[in-house]
Amino acid sequence: MCGIVGYVGEKVALDVVVEGLRRLEYRGYDSAGVAIVTNETLWVAKKAGKLGNLEKLLAEEQLPPSGLGIGHTRWATHGGPTDVNAHPHISSNGRIALVHNGIIENYVTLREELAAAGITCESETDTEIVAQLVGQQVSAGLPLVEAMRVVCGRLRGAFTLVAVDSETPDGVVAARRNSPLVVGVGEGENFVASDVAAFIEHTREAIELGQDQLVSITPDTVKVITFDGEPAEVKPYHVDWDLSAAEKGGYDWFMRKEIYEQPRAVADTLLGRHDANSQLTLDEIRISEAELRRVDKIIVVACGTAFYAGLVAKYAIEHWTRIPCEVELASEFRYRDPIVGPTTLVVAISQSGETADTLMAIRHAREQQSRVLAICNTNGSTIPRESDAVIYTHAGPEIGVASTKGFLTQLVACYLLGLYLAQVREVKYGDEIAEILRELSAMPDAISEVLDDIGPVLNLAAEFADKRSVLFIGRHVGYPVALEGALKLKELAYIHAEGFAAGELKHGPIALIEDQVPVFVVVPPRGRDLLHDKVVSNLQEIRARGAKTIVLAEEDDDEVSRYADVMIKLPRVSTLLQPLVATVPLQMFACELATQKGHDVDQPRNLAKSVTVE
Ligand code: F6R
């Protein structure tokens, strides 16, 4: 939540910062603002609404050229999305401009303290308090980096802070605790940002900042210290994707582009994970095989779409390894006092690697001595850094707020984890694992097949644009697919959508079925006879009550086609892998329906890509 950029160098800082904000707008789009420093003067422009509003303001105000600037795009927490609450916030002495991502939990006490010192805040934000506190420290004679260090020591909560001081116009200072911050290292210029996408156009060399660290950048230097004032060890890395991956490439939406990238993303996530003899080698796993053999329970923690990937993982992992696997919403996990210990493997799934609920869940798990394995798409993000092991999904940057290729690659990583555990614990024969890996390697083509035949789904979206409610049902791994289809539709099209386990319909939800209500039915492959037949029965039940059935089933499944008002054909794949193909039409349906309704598909209302507050 909230995107932050800071720049120092020879380029026009305003251009670099605004371009960076454009690439970070997925993180929040309630307001945007910039500050630049020139001739010991701060220039600030900020505006409620999307970045476009700020750009209009900048076109009118024409700030002077400067090589030093910061910017912010906001997802509101404290105080509504107004001009006044937009960042940057300025200290009363006029020296400090500061932007923030996160929540300062002790802001009420700090605000009272400032009031007692005669400083009143203009905005309702927790951020302005920090700007005022830093302002007090520089007025007392501390250099900006020291002022920030002192203030950070007094803050509770989660924060990435980026600040400039008009009286020391040679650099930017940034700090982080529980919120993301990366440094971009250029030649004669340096950057700080919430995400490398903000500076990928300028440099692919980055440094990940650790917890409770501060960085000060000038055009030629990058200095990292801890909140205790000690020099910190830096971890440089090279970003393995480029600007083209962060652009729309001719598509109307990032989301649509990312849906089409799925065959490649799945292939990349499978790449290099096993040798010619199908021996899985997940080299990012830093938990010994002996420890993995001792695991007696797996708990998957995740939120939203990643949670649904976890639900699929449960079916695969339990079936392949016979280890009991629970799946828990990360936001609920630590508050129910879960039974976890040294033999529990906690698997945290997160595309962004920054989701606060998931982060807090893994911290709780580690406090109970559990081992934590992260499945994550963002190199250098907090969740993998705080985990004992990582399986990175290689989806490339996911910019559309609604997760698509993130989800499919999370599924792949979950399958790989299940197979790896089966191999280590010797509960599956090598040839059985090899067979599943062969099936997995055929999935990119199967997904492409679905995409090549997506026309009927697009037509359906046009036809359903006026519907007020859509239902989704499925069984087994088709159940999480139904939940995911409903979530996509809710978040993008803003219409009522519910996913149900098909077997649960008769226990209540069937009352929702009335004439012409669209119901998407995910039918399992015929390989699972019993399961397949049960869903066919459910299909008949809802059709008899007037539902319009949109059936996702294997291409030559003649048995179901007679109960389908609309048939969406899926390639033949095995039961456990079916979510990789069955989800794709549902993603596209939501994307297209939202487009038809004139919504902003990449930036749905009230949402943000990376939810860094609990
Ligand atoms: C929905 C969506 C969200 C995320 C959730 C977790 O389309 O994108 O539900 O899946 O906020 O995010 P990550 O995976 O970054 O932890």
Image: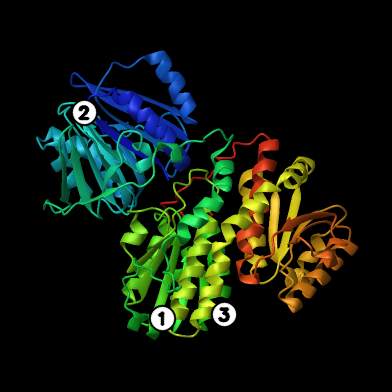
- Residue under numbered circle 2: 95
Mark in the foreground, 2 or 3: 3
Looking at the picture, how far across and down is residue 120, in whole percent? 30, 34
Q: Which mark is residue 327?
A: none
Looking at the image, residue 400 sits to the left or right of residue 546; the answer is: left
Q: Circle 1: is it few (<14), some (14-19), or many (20+) Cα within 10 Å?
A: some
- Would you identify the image quadrant in which residue 89 lies? top left
Count of labels in the image:
3
Q: Is residue 20 visible?
A: yes
Q: Quadrant of residue 201?
A: top left
Please name the amino acid that badge 1 sits on. Val
Amino acid identity at mark 2: Arg
The location of residue 152, given as percent across then percent down, is: 22, 48
| Mark 2 or mark 3, earlier in chain | 2
Marks 2 and 1: which is nearer the front? 1
Q: Give the side of residue 346 with respect to residue 475, left or right.
A: left
Quarter of the image where the C terminus is located: bottom left
Q: Nearer the viewer, residue 377 or 422?
A: 422
Residue 55 pos. (x, y %): 44, 22
Direction from residue 177 to residue 358 in the image, left or right: right
Amino acid at circle 3: His
* Residue under label 1: 424
User: Which sits in the foreground, 530 or 519?
Assistant: 530
Find numbered disc 1 in the image and state the secondary structure of the residue it sits on: helix
The one of 190 and 452 positioned closer to us in this rendering? 452
Mark 3 highlights which residue?
A: 319
